[in-house]
Structure formats: C-alpha cells, structure tokens
Image (cartoon, grey):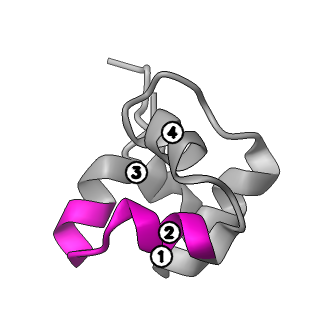
C-alpha cells in the first residue's frame, strides 16, 4: 500500500500532472493512486522527488 493519493491531495496536485512529470500514462498513475498496483521502487523514488517528499512519506507501514 502507498500514500500517493494522500500526498497529492495535501499538495493540491492532480494525477494528470504527476503522470506528465513521470512520463507515464494517466491510467498507470491512477493505478498507483488507487493502490490497484504498486510502483517499482525506482518509480516510487522518482515520485517522491517530484512531489518533494521523503520516500518514507509515500509508504504505509505494515508494522503495528
């Protein structure tokens, strides 16, 4: 699970903008945002850099 959706909403950024910056389709980014698929680690790092957040902020911890 990832927190891309929450970070986008907090920053007021649209999925289409992120898709353009990543060079990926809207459908691919929407899959990440809706947690239907998880981005590769390299892509997750790129998303964090584009959104100016630490990659840890995009990951949901599975620890209780």
Q: Which residue is mark 3?
A: 4
Residue 1 horizontal side relative to residue 34, left or right: right
Looking at the rendering, the stretch of residues picked out in magenta corresponds to 8-20
Q: CA distance from mark 4 to mark 1?
A: 14 Å
Q: Which residue is mark 1?
A: 51
Q: Which residue is mark 2?
A: 18
> Residue 36 location in percent, x, y?
48, 22
The image's mark for residue 32 is: 4
Give the class, few, some or many, for how many residues have Cα within 10 Å of label 3's Cα (few <14, many ≥20). many
SS at mark 1 in the image:
helix
Give yes or no for residue 55 being in the magenta stretch: no
Q: Are marks 4 and 3 in contact (CB under 8 Å)?
A: yes
> Residue 54 location in percent, x, y?
52, 68
Q: Earlier in the sequence, mark 3 or mark 1?
A: 3
Q: Are marks 2 and 3 in contact (CB under 8 Å)?
A: yes
Q: Earlier in the sequence, mark 4 or mark 1?
A: 4
Residue occupying image coordinates x 46% and y 51%: 58
Q: CA distance from mark 4 to mark 3?
A: 7 Å
> Residue 39 location in percent, x, y?
66, 40
SS at mark 3 in the image:
helix
Image quadrant assignment for residue 48:
bottom right
Image quadrant assignment for residue 19:
bottom right
């Amino acid at each position: 699970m990832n927190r891309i959706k929450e970070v986008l909403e907090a920053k007021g950024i649209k999925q289409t903008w992120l898709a353009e910056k990543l060079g990926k389709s809207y459908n691919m980014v929407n899959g990440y945002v809706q947690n239907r698929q998880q981005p590769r680690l390299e892509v997750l790092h790129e998303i964090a850099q584009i959104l100016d957040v630490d990659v840890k902020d995009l990951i949901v911890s599975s620890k209780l």
